[in-house]
Image: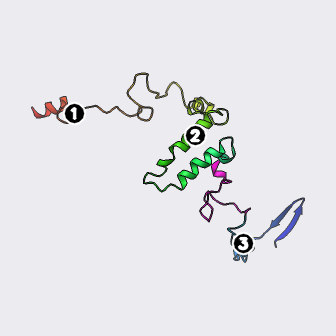
Amino acid sequence: MSYCRQEGKDRIIFVTKEDHETPSNAELIADDPNDPYEEQGLILPNGDINWNCPCLGGMASGPCGSQFKEAFSCFHYSKEEVKGSECIDNFRNMQECMQSYPELYPQEEEKESSPEAESNTGSDSAAPVEGSALSPETDSTPAALNISPDSTSSTDSQSTS
């Protein structure tokens, strides 16, 4: 037999196996899209940008919030063939603002010196050697040889003789 017990602010409900075997009779209430307290996604039902979305990480309210909003709005509402191509100046303004607050918006080089990045480096690291033609993304794979289409390798000339 199921029962309920109150412990302070918590209500504890004990149920039996039989309680779980019967279908639920709970009625679900549809979300009200106009409820200002209801969590919304990045784009509101009316098509506007939800500047309070946690997915923006507070960027819209920081010291460069207005620059971020201008750049993001420009990109979101862009109708250009290359989406956002007309927004370069907005993004440049945002970047300049962020560079004036390095403690809030660290640069990529500074992020790489974080403890997480240091744990990824070590004696077995495949970092490219100075002067190496390989980029960090490709240095774990063999380098491609630059051979012109009309040249032959030594193995090709051996097989034809």
**Quadrant of the image for the C terminus?**
top left
Q: How crowded is the residue under tag 2: few (<14 C-alpha within 10 Å), some, or many (20+)?
A: some
Is 17 part of what is drawn in magenta?
A: no
Q: Is residue 158 left or right of residue 9?
A: left
Cα distance in 3D space between marks 1 and 3: 72 Å
Mark 2–mark 3 CB contact (< 8 Å):
no
> Looking at the picture, does residue 161 appear above or below residue 67?
above
- Tell me the CA gap for discs 2 and 3: 58 Å
The amino acid type found where label 3 is placed reads His
Give residue 158's position: percent from left, percent from top. 14, 30
Q: Which residue is denoted by mark 3 in the rendering? A: 20
Which SS class for mark 3?
helix
In the figure, 131 relative to 82: above or below?
A: above
Identify which residue is drawn at 57% across, 50% down. Answer: 72
Query: Residue 99 falls in which quadrant of the image?
Result: top right
Q: Position of residue 71 (x, y in %)?
A: 57, 47
Identity of the residue drawn at 14% across and 31% down? 157
> Is 136 drawn above or below residue 20 in the view shown?
above
Q: Position of residue 143 (x, y in %)?
A: 34, 31
How far separated are the C-alphas under marks 2 and 1? 45 Å
Residue range corresponding to the magenta coloring = 36-56
Q: Is residue 42 magenta?
A: yes
| Label pair 1/3, CB-CB below 8 angstroms | no
* Pointer 2 or 3: first along the chain: 3
Coordinates of residue 53 in the picture (x, y in percent): 66, 54
Near mark 3 (Cα within 10 A), the count class, few <14, some 14-19 or many ≥20, is: few
